[in-house]
């Protein structure tokens, strides 16, 4: 099956979690919005799927994945859908449910990290809420960042292996790589201060980055750089 991914073409964003899974799973897919508008791509391609009046199950927002006639929305839901199809989750129902729970927890984590620089409203510029962001950043670095990273460090410790689910790589490991990479970009000082406390998470990041398909993808133009338009953004004043 050839998959179609629909996500905004100018950032990694939530679509990057799906891209990493498609790349590691060696899936046949097209990143539709990255195509020229003349070829049916660009931001209008995403808008067309969102505004399709014939869809009886309209999605709320991208990323969206088309698999034949099926349209799947929400990052965690897409990964739950792709995991079994690409061999990136165990077969046991209990393990798949646990993996989905981990992915949902990462969704919460990413949202809290995003809200550091946009604590009031997404529709406002960072400069319009900078005072609130500075206050929020201290709480995030001192409380929530530690709480989430300590949790995932414990997950690997108790898994009995080097990955979140044990001895085999799954889609949640690919997502954890993206979370760690994003945090290292947006909060370099805070993450450096936690490095010695997170040996398993840092090792997981490096293992995923070194996997042949992921390493090839990271080195390609398809892997966009981090930026101050993305989910996690580098504003030095928010890093303490």
Image: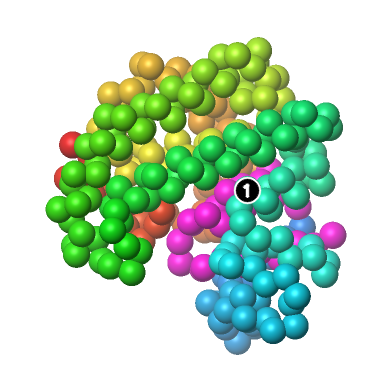
Quadrant of the frame with the N terminus: bottom right
Q: Give the labeled residue for mark 1.
A: 76
**Residue reaching furthest to the bottom:** 38
**Residue 14 colored magenta?**
yes
Q: Residue at x 19, y 64 (%)?
A: 128
Disc 1 crowd rating (10 Å Cα; few below 14, some 14-19, many 20+) is many
Q: Is residue 35 visible?
A: no
Q: Residue at x 24, y 42 (%)?
A: 137
Q: Residue at x 68, y 81 (%)?
A: 52
**Residue 101 colored magenta?**
no
Please state the horizontal and vertical placement of residue 22, each as a whole percent of the image: 69, 50
Q: Residue at x 65, y 12 (%)?
A: 160
Q: Looking at the picture, does residue 30 appear above or below residue 56?
A: above
Q: Looking at the picture, does residue 65 appear above or below residue 187?
A: below
Q: Which residues are magenta?
A: 1-27
Q: Is residue 100 visible?
A: yes
Please state the horizontal and vertical placement of residue 210, each as a whole percent of the image: 57, 33
Q: Nearer the viewer, residue 41 or 145?
A: 145
Give the quarter of the image for residue 112.
Answer: top left
Q: How many discs mark residues in the rendered view? A: 1
Please state the horizontal and vertical placement of residue 136, each as a whole percent of the image: 24, 44
Q: Nearer the viewer, residue 135 or 127?
A: 135
Q: Left or right of 155: which side holds 13?
A: left
Q: Left or right of 90: which side holds 60?
A: left
Q: Left or right of 238: which side holds 231?
A: right
Q: Secondary structure at mark 1?
A: helix
Quadrant of the frame with the C terminus: top left
Please state the horizontal and vertical placement of residue 181, each as a whole percent of the image: 44, 39
Q: Nearer the viewer, residue 72 or 31?
A: 72
Structure colour scheme: rainbow
């Amino acid at each position: 099956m050839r998959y179609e991914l629909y996500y905004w073409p100018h950032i990694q964003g939530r679509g990057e979690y799906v891209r990493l899974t498609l790349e590691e799973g060696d899936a046949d897919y097209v990143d539709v919005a990255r195509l020229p508008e003349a070829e049916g791509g660009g931001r209008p391609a995403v808008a067309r799927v969102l505004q399709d009046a014939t869809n009886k199950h309209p999605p709320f927002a991208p990323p969206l994945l088309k698999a034949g006639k099926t349209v799947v929305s929400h990052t965690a839901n897409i990964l739950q859908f792709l995991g079994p199809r690409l061999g990136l989750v165990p077969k046991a129902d209990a393990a798949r449910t646990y993996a989905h729970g981990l992915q949902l927890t990462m969704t919460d984590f990413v949202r809290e990290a995003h809200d550091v620089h946009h604590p009031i409203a997404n529709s406002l510029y960072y400069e319009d809420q900078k005072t609130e962001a500075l206050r929020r950043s201290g709480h995030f670095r001192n409380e929530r960042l530690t709480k989430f990273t300590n949790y995932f460090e414990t997950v690997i410790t108790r898994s009995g292996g080097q990955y979140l689910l044990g001895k085999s790589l799954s889609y949640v490991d690919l997502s954890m790589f993206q979370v760690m990479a994003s945090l290292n970009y947006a909060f370099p000082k805070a993450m450096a201060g936690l490095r010695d406390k997170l040996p398993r998470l840092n090792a997981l990041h490096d293992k995923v980055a070194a996997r042949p398909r992921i390493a090839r993808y990271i080195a390609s133009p398809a892997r966009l750089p981090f930026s101050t338009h993305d989910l996690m953004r580098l504003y030095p004043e928010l890093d303490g």
